[in-house]
Amino acid sequence: MTTTVETSPEQQAQYGVWPLDEHNQALLRSAHPDDWTNPTPQGRYNLVVLGAGTAGLVAAAGAAGLGAKVALVERRLMGGDCLNYGCVPSKALIRVARAVADIRRARELGVRLDGDPDVDFPAVMARMRALRARIAPHDSVQRFAELGIDVFLGDGRFAGPDTLTVEGQTLRFARACIATGARPVTPPIPGLADTGFLTNETVFSLTELPQRLAILGAGPIGCELAQTFVRFGAEVHLIDIADQVLGREDRDAAEIVHAALRQDGVSLLLGHGVARVERTADGKRLHFRDEDATTSLDVDELLVGVGRAPNVDGIGLEAAGVQFDKRVGVTVDDRLRTSNARIFAAGDVCSAYKFTHTADALARIVIQNALFFGRARASTLTVPWCTYTDPEVAHVGAYEHETREKGIATTIVRIEMNSVDRAILDGEEDGFVKILAGKRSGKILGATLVARHAGEMISEITALMARGGRLKDLSRTIHPYPTQAEVFKKAGDAHARTGLTPTVKKILSTILAWRR
Ligand SMILES: Cc1cc2nc3c(=O)[nH]c(=O)nc-3n(C[C@H](O)[C@H](O)[C@H](O)COP(=O)(O)OP(=O)(O)OC[C@H]3O[C@@H](n4cnc5c(N)ncnc54)[C@H](O)[C@@H]3O)c2cc1C
């Protein structure tokens, strides 16, 4: 039996893809072609993958490449959050926002420009849609079918411990991988649902710039988009109940982002809870939870980015005997096995590290462990991450408070970006690197980097950490001059100087005197 999957324009809009211009039509042809016919399942699959975001795509392609018989099931858009409503569209917009900021600073660099840059928001969004459509074929139904994978479009759900149903067909499997990702959390604020709000699944469909935008949640998504929209010319209010932006990061790193957001003109309402939301004649009104509940804010649009919840509902986990927690996700062990030995999980649905590169890395572990008796462990991964504000904040390994809580004796080396020649020349002096290392071993335990290109630079520390590198290895690495990455060499040198105790200096002086 074959099933033809037909999608109407309304359904396509439901996927968060709007407007249906040539770019989005191209995206849909890759990510959810309306004339796609699901194949007929053939016997038992080595691996059935539920969800075709990064984790699902990597697991399916990797397994098929090794000769496994693979089925991949996707209910919305191939490429998942990253391609359609996450990394790809957000970074396309951030690129433009940076250009705007650079143009505004042109006078500082000695370039005369008349007036303020005029951002053509519809053109910016069209550029984003064009680039997203250009990247989409890599994740497309067609490409995965050509890899020999049976691609099923439709809502997948486990029907038992070794079967999954989709569009009326039953897929039998030896192993399965749950890769259903996560979705935006809706906070229980009275009036919110009725008033309507944007999330990451709809904000990239805007065709007009909201003049007044409130963003709820000052985490990575909130901070990135607040800076982007304010640079585009919107009045932006960034609201969080916490008293710090980027709550996961060290306060000294977060403070630099806070200052940058203010400099750009974002109004920061930290320590503010929203009591209720209501519709007004021309927009939305947020009432704050202050003592008298009198303060309010009128905006045109409200974007909610307060967190991500794993997609564990309605996928038949009970029938499959897979344990889960609605907040944390599918329960897995270090080898990514669920409570059903046939079923594994990867990506946002089971990981606290909700990043594309982690989804990719976990999917690779699933391939090894599910198909080849592998013993790869998630806990051995060295996972960096980055928030793409300007400046960026990148982190890998342990935070200062974690080493303190665990009682690990550490050396902390901190170098300011304003001591690095290239950062001075680039006019990108805001930021620092802070590296934590074992006091005795010198082994790098973690690092936070705040710099304009921190996301590009952090990989040097990640690579070093992954092979048990030490602070002194940073001095031994030759960095091209002048680059901002020299900040790492400076950190290594600063650490080396601490080894020059008075006794060592005395010995060295004696040797040098003897050699004169
Ligand atoms: C605005 C934003 C910006 C981001 N920026 C970055 C960034 O810069 N860098 C970074 O590393 N990460 C970023 N992320 C996070 C990143 O997008 C996710 O970590 C990544 O997409 C997780 O991949 P995944 O495969 O686990 O899940 P997803 O990408 O969510 O894919 C899961 C898929 O499963 C499908 N599915 C769910 N249930 C079913 C079902 N029953 N049947 C069939 N299919 C189903 C879904 O439709 C979806 O396509 C960002 C996220 C957001 C929201």
Image (cartoon, rainbow, N blue to C red):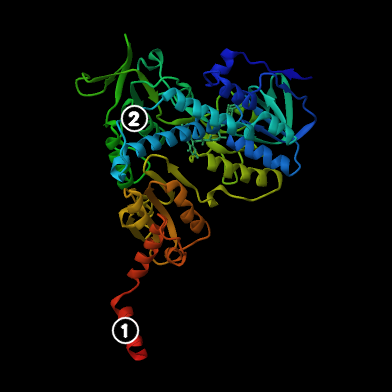
The quadrant of the rendering that contains the N terminus is: top right
Percent x, y of residue 393: 39, 45
Which residue is at a point 32% across and 27% down the rendered structure image?
A: 236
Which of 30 and 1 lies nearest the eye of the viewer? 30
Distance (Cα) linking label 2 and label 1:
58 Å
Query: Residue under circle 2?
Result: 230
On the image, the x and y values in percent for residue 298 come to 28, 18
Image quadrant where one finds the C terminus = bottom left
Q: State which tag comes first along the sequence, 2 or 1.
A: 2
Label 2 amino acid?
Val
Closer to us: 311 or 306: 306
Q: Quadrant of ligand 1?
A: top right
Residue 295 location, quadrant = top left
The CB of the residue at mark 2 lies under 8 Å from ligand 1: no
Q: Is residue 314 placed above or below 383 in the rendered structure? A: above
Whether residue 342 can be seen here: no
Location of mark 1 (residue):
509
Secondary element under disc 1, as helix, strand or loop, is helix
Quick one: which residue is furthest to the top in this view? 281
